[in-house]
Amino acid sequence: MKKTAGYVIKKLEEEYVLLPTGELAEQVNEVISLSETAGFIYLHADQAASVEELADLVSREYGIKKEEVLEDVQMVVETLCKRGVLQQSAQ
């Protein structure tokens, strides 16, 4: 996974927000709100080459079986990719 340049993440209580910065802030006029888990996925995206690896990280962090989080992690990654803040690595 690769994060798209031009975003900064901030934690606000129990959620995260992604803010566009620099030139991107002029093009993208929105703040993206993320749940705690989605924020964890975004923060650790650079440490994983695949959705499966991200699901493994989430599994270990929250003490949940990988099989139980894999579908949710996939949905979060797809959403972040559609929003342009993450890019899946070519396999």
Image (cartoon, grey):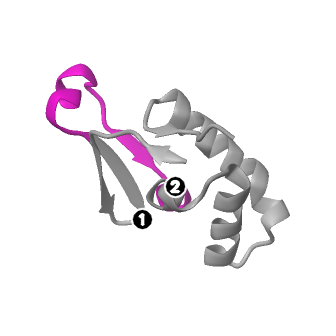
Q: Which residues are magenta?
A: 20-40
* Magenta residue check for 51: no
Residue 1: x percent and y percent?
55, 48
Mark linked to residue 14: 1
Residue 68: x percent and y percent?
82, 62
Depth order, front residue of 34/87: 87
Where on the picture, by quarter, is residue 24? top left
Residue 36 in sight in this render? no
The crowd level at tag 2 (other Cα within 10 Å; few <14, some 14-19, many 20+) is many
The crowd level at tag 1 (other Cα within 10 Å; few <14, some 14-19, many 20+) is few
Residue 76: x percent and y percent?
61, 44
- Which amino acid lies under the numbered mark 1 shown in the image of this protein? Glu
Depth order, front residue of 37/1: 1
Q: Which residue occupies 61% across, 76% down?
A: 61
Query: Would you place residue 82 above or below residue 47 in this image?
Result: above
Residue extending furthest toward the right = 67
Residue 67 as seen in the image, left or right of residue 88? right
- Which amino acid lies under the numbered mark 2 shown in the image of this protein? Ala
Secondary structure of residue under mark 1: loop
Residue 86 as seen in the image, left or right of residue 18? right
Alpha carbon distance from label 2 to label 1: 19 Å
What residue does disc 2 label? 45
Ranked by sequence position, the earlier of labels 2 and 1 is 1
